[in-house]
Amino acid sequence: MSPDYYYRLIALSASPVGKGLLPMIEPSGYAFSALRDGEPALYRGCADGVESILVVSPPGENPAFESIKRLEREYALRTDLGSAWAVCPVGLTTYRGNPALVLEDPGGEPLLRLIAQGLDVATFLHIAIGLTAAVQQMHGRGLIHKDIKPANILVDIERNSVRLTGFGIASRVSREHQAPEPPDVIAGTLAYMAPEQTGRMNRSIDSRSDLYAVGITFYQMLTGVLPFAASDPIEWVHCHIARRPVPPRDRTPAVPPQISSLVMKLLAKAPEDRYQSAAGIEADLRRCLAEWEVEGNIRLFPLGGRDAPDRLMIPERLYGRERDVERLLGAFDRVLADGMPQLVLVSGYSGIGKSSVVNELHKALVPPRGLFACGKFDQYKRDIPYATLAQAFEGLVRMILARPDPELARWRDAITTALGPSGQLMVTLIPELELVVGKQPPIAELSPRDTLIRFQTVFGRFLGVFAQPEHPLALFLDDLQWLDAATLQLLEHLFIESEIRHLLFVGAYRDNEVGTEHPLKRTLEVIRQAGAPMQEIVLASLGLEDVNTLVADSLRVERPTARTLAQLVQEKTGGNPFFTNQFFAMLAEERLLAFDPVAAAWSWDVARIRAKGYTDNVAVLLAGKLHRLAHRTQQALQHFACLGNAAELVTLAIVCDEAYQTMEAILADAVEAGLIVSLGRSCSFLHDLVQEAAYALIPQDLRANAHLRIGRLLAARTPAEKREEAVFDIVNQINRGAALITAQAERDQFAELNLIAGKRA
């Protein structure tokens, strides 16, 4: 077993919780029977004179670190769970030598045991109503489950009770972003996973993601089978995002048409087309049950009549961008058709939706098993050569490391063959690559010009490993207005001199910051003159009709009803999509958009909104949102903004001088406010404009101090063996406050770090 596993096991057993719990429910005193196999397993334990318990434990001798973390996560959520609708944790212990979570035993059996042949209509309706009531109460506590499935539902038919369990990946965040990681490493169960939870839908995970999983569960309850069948993880993803399931009634004729339609509504690909609340599902199910019990039949009626979410949920559809998305997807189709590389440039003002348009590629990449790599240039890191390319390919390297051993070996062979004796060049750029290809021989020193040519050639071969007919590559580099000179030269080489194929390169930039003399413009003109396939997509502001549709969809009203409010929103935001969403959300936060639970509808007063005198400047609006956060959170975001658009939580903990374990709690309000996006062990600002607003909170005359402090902390707390790898991040901070350094010893130390950075560059 790994040392990390032993450490986790010892820490768990020695915790105050574990110490207090073990004498009370020593597992050896119970006779256990398995209720659920798989990962993790569920056992019921009974002992004479003692109430029975449930124990959840990862199977096997060396459970994965993530499995142990999920047990801890479920226990940490115990105060958010209610015994009427959830199976509540009572402690952490060990079972058969593995960490284990102990739960109350409310009785009942996992739903999975009851549905092998499908359920009759009456039984289905009773269980379905209990399940939706449980989900409704869970959502009312601000939780998203993210892994609802029959194995995580405990049903006691005699008592007519349904309870949820399996909260190991549940989230307290109302909206959460899932990166497009390899599908077999995404937390959750692929067969029940909502399209947006796969990371390929350009949508956030929210409470409606759970409702999709409820739909899959209903389908299985009625038919005894899943709506989709797949042989591998990527095929599961394709099923969820692109395939329409066969209606339950077509598989099982005994299913009433109305119930079949209800399930199909839950399985809509877009969250906006599903039920919006568990309460809406429960209301329709109760109507179905009442008619079935009286008449033995269910008449058709409009679904969702009482389905209105009591919080504002702005759709994440792209409004007014249909033609732009079609042009982008058309370029990718040409890559698939003839293998020729395509260059697409997406431009427009900040907040206009460039990244959102490009992210529509994720769906198109699934059927051909295409790869997606993305990096984002940072205005504060423009002197770090190739940093954004390294960021993009780090994601691909991590994808490789997550693959099974035989596939990892194939990637290793392909990369080693392509790089030949120059592998150390790519390992220096992407240190994690060494975990794939192993230690590489040192590189011979050449003249500066020959060194550059060698790097460009080797990088082209490295890129070619990923850009193949069996898995074409889409490479997206954002914020090209801030790109470094070395990357610009490399792009010119790739499109003019290299023989790269099966590549879609997409670059996005703010056209108002790229004038005719900008190096990017000159290089693009050279590439164009060389005859490389290139097209430009210029995004304009949204027109009134698009804003009107967005407002009407958000409030679930007809467009004429929303028009006056939409005109005011358009007037204030100028049709900038990011500003529009932020402004609209702020109206709800300040109760100028209010939900009437009796009428189950939204109300607003345009005159009051206009009289409020809201700013028409997005920076001022964001600054106001930041100032409403706790002081500690504001400070953390200021430090975060100094680092860039994204950062690892461990790095944030260093620069905030906080314990790693507390960073998630410190940032929770900012995540909930939609200002930053949590990505597991890292996080990013929702948008460059948020980063800029957070940075602007630091007084101008204190910014150099802030950067110098961060540089000193990074230098002091980065292990010696990792210092060269992190040297660009360190000197980038120090150099912005170098004028404040007075001690000669410190000046010498940081001069040496700059020398290391110069040589590495």
Image (tube, helix red, strand yellow):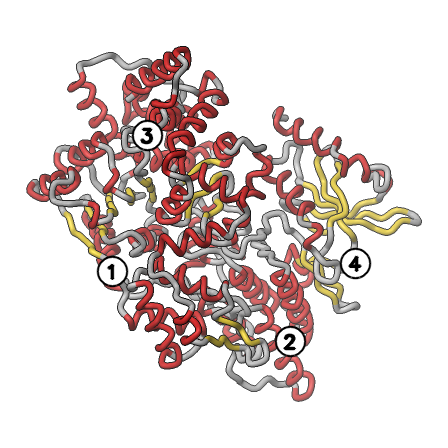
Please identify the quadrant where the N terminus is shown: top right
Residue 364 visible: no
Q: Which numbered mark, 4 or 1, is in the foreground of this view?
A: 1
Label 1 packing within 10 angstroms: few (<14), some (14-19), many (20+):
few
Give the CA separation, mark 2 to mark 1: 44 Å
| Picture coordinates of residue 633, whole percent (x, y) | 52, 44
**As shown in the figure, which amino acid type bears the numbered disc 3?**
Ala
Question: For numbered disc 2, what is the local secondary structure?
Answer: helix
Residue 121 badge: 2
Question: For numbered disc 1, what is the local secondary structure?
Answer: helix
Question: For numbered disc 3, what is the local secondary structure?
Answer: helix
In the image, is 69 to the left or to the right of 50?
Answer: left
Q: Which numbered mark, 2 or 1, is in the foreground of this view?
A: 1
Give the CA separation, mark 4 to mark 3: 54 Å
Question: Badge 1 is on which residue?
Answer: 326
**As shown in the figure, which amino acid type bears the numbered disc 2?**
Val
Please identify the quadrant where the C terminus is shown: top left
Q: Nearer the viewer, residue 711 or 395?
A: 711
The mark nearer the N terminus, 4 or 3, is 4
